[in-house]
Image (tube, grey):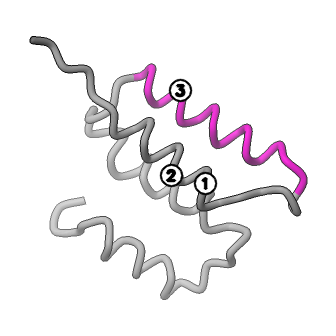
Amino acid sequence: MAGKDSASGFINLLRRHISARAVLRVCFEEWKKSAAPAGSVSNARLQRAEAIWEEEQARPAGQRNAVAAYNRISETLGKRKHTL
């Protein structure tokens, strides 16, 4: 989204009173709406991020760790292939 950075996006989510249980889902959905269509991420990385998301959702609610899953997704989406 033009004119918005990740911090302002996060603040907007908090203002919407997103529950702790739903924050990872909402973050990922919002990211997919804004960044994924721009083509900034390869399909392979997007599929890996989706797999992490699905893995986290398959865990029993008491065993989920939204922060760890967010970090794994963020790392996956942030990796870029560099050629020399």
Q: Closer to the observer: label 3 or label 2?
A: 2
- The residues colored magenta run 43-60
**Disc 3 versus disc 2: distance between alpha carbons?**
16 Å
Please, what is the three-letter code of the amino acid marked with disc 2? Answer: Asn
CA neighbours of label 3 inside 10 A, class few (<14), some (14 to 19), many (20+): few
Horizontal side of residue 53 vs 64, given as left or right: left
Horizontal side of residue 49 vs 66, given as left or right: left
CA neighbours of label 1 inside 10 A, class few (<14), some (14 to 19), many (20+): few
Q: Which residue is mark 2?
A: 71
Horizontal side of residue 43 vs 19, given as left or right: left
The answer to which of marks 3 and 2 sits earlier in the sequence is: 3
Where's the N terminus, which quadrant? bottom left
**Disc 1 versus disc 2: distance between alpha carbons?**
5 Å
Seen at 44% across and 27% down, the residue is 45
Q: Give residue 67's position: percent from left, percent from top.
A: 59, 61
Looking at the image, residue 14 lies above or below residue 41:
below
Q: Give residue 57's position: percent from left, percent from top.
A: 77, 47
Q: Which residue is mark 3?
A: 47
Name the image quarter holding residue 36: top left
